[in-house]
Image (spheres, rainbow, N blue to C red):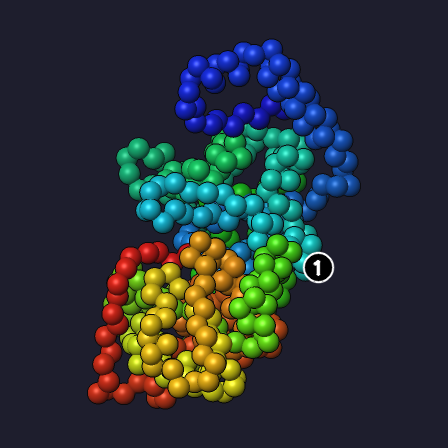
Amino acid sequence: MISVISMPCVNMAVCLNKLFNPFSTCLMFILIVHSSTTNNNISDSQIDSNGYVAYCPCMGRFGNQADHFLGSLAFAHGLDRTLILPPWIEYHHDRSSRVEMVPFDTYFKVEALQEYHRVITMEKFMKLFAARVWPVGQRKSLCYMARKFNDDMIDNDCNAKDGNPFGPFWDNFGINFVSSEFHQPLFFNTQDVHILDAWQEKFPAATHPVLAFTGAPASFPVTEENRHLHRYLQWSKKFDKESDVFIEENFPNRTFVGIHLRNGIDWKNACEHINMSPSLFAAPQCLGYRRENGDSYAELCAPPRHIILTQVKKALKKMRTGNLFVATDVDAMVHDFRKELRAIKGLKVVRGHADSPHLDLAVLAKSTYYIGNCISSFSAFPKRERDVAGRPSAFWAFPKHEYVTPEKDLHLQVISEHDEL
């Protein structure tokens, strides 16, 4: 099988030379033969007869994608199909339409996930198994119901590749769909045996070897029963080592308070809807999935500076350290901390990595004490990791009665504009 991936050609003369150059053609032929031979060498025992689950992690940035991943892992486990690990979709901060596909195992260990269930990276699946399991001409997309947002889209179809990042995601692997199927009224809670049986009956592996979902087969935020699966989401050796090195260099005794601040203009705009959305984004992680801890409130989403300073001061004293690590997309409040907390012995404020937020997450997970934003799915990531490890954590302005009083200033100063990762 020959797979063609279209790439942008900056210099047409160079591209034509490469295309018709005898050596290039020979090399291309060798690569194609090798790929074909590799596929043919796959034995039946290596193919999952129960089938596979694939999906586009097309909703939101990393925090949202991580929530969806845990639900998708549970879904595949419930169906007893191998989960195809999609690359992480990363967006450029210049607000262009460009997206980057980062292989799943760049950040996390595949072998750790295999302790829970069968998984395979999408790159490996497409290279070794797709030709036999999911041949071109037999690839169908799956969605709950037809998606059509404009007249240019096909009627009664998932239109799985329409829009960004949907199109670029599937194009990254040279995947085109010949048709669509709908799974309405089935949802993804395969813990329910009746729903599980319905999935198996409607989409048997014999006729549907790959269930390729337009979006993640999961709820957002991650459901309460799937939070524990975070224990299998372990950092790759690279990020585990880099976070250890960073901690050793900045906090040699490894005792420090880690905090995550969300204070960009986009976040302020989102927080304006908090009263109308009592379970906004990741709110259930502190308010409860049945809102047993109350409804959302402004300070929970956008904590004012005096609350942040108060909680950080308490945390540093409680942990008996002056070491503070700040992860943020905008304002790290370094000047505020150094000025207002100057009485704390040995105060040291270290800002995180603007160019490597995943490294920030790994560092936050290893902090002695952590304070995050209850509404933020980015904050939720290290919180789940810490819960698994039994490390203490807290949220800004929570519980409400301890930090929020009517007479205090509830306005948050915003100085820049960025999206949450």
Residue 403 in percent (x, y) is at 34, 86
Q: In the figure, is residue 208 to the left or right of 9?
A: right
Which residue is drawn at the image coordinates 33% and 46% (left, top)? 94
- Write down the quadrant of residue 409 in the picture: bottom left
Which quadrant is home to the C terminus? bottom left
Q: Is residue 163 left or right of residue 249?
A: left
Above or below, 130 against 14 in this view is: below
Which residue appears at 41% of the width and 24% of the height? 10
- Total residue callouts: 1
Regarding residue 385, the answer to whether it shows in the image is no
Q: Secondary structure at mark 1?
A: loop
The x, y position of residue 84, in whole percent, is 60, 46
- 238 sits left or right of 405 in the view: right
Task: Locate residue 341: give its quadrant.
Answer: bottom left
CA neighbours of label 1 inside 10 A, class few (<14), some (14 to 19), many (20+): few
The image shows residue 90 at horizontal and vertical percentages of 45, 48
Where is residue 38 shown, x and y percent of the image? 72, 30
Q: Name the quadrant of the N terminus.
A: top right
Identify the residue under disc 1. 115
Q: Nearer the viewer, residue 366 or 135?
A: 366
Would residue 10 be seen by someone viewing this image from the given angle? yes
Image position of 53 with respect to 117: above or below:
above
Q: Residue at x 33, y 72 (%)?
A: 335
Q: Amino acid at mark 1?
A: Glu
Q: Residue at x 38, y 82 (%)?
A: 342
Of the pair 280 and 99, the residue shown nearer to us? 99
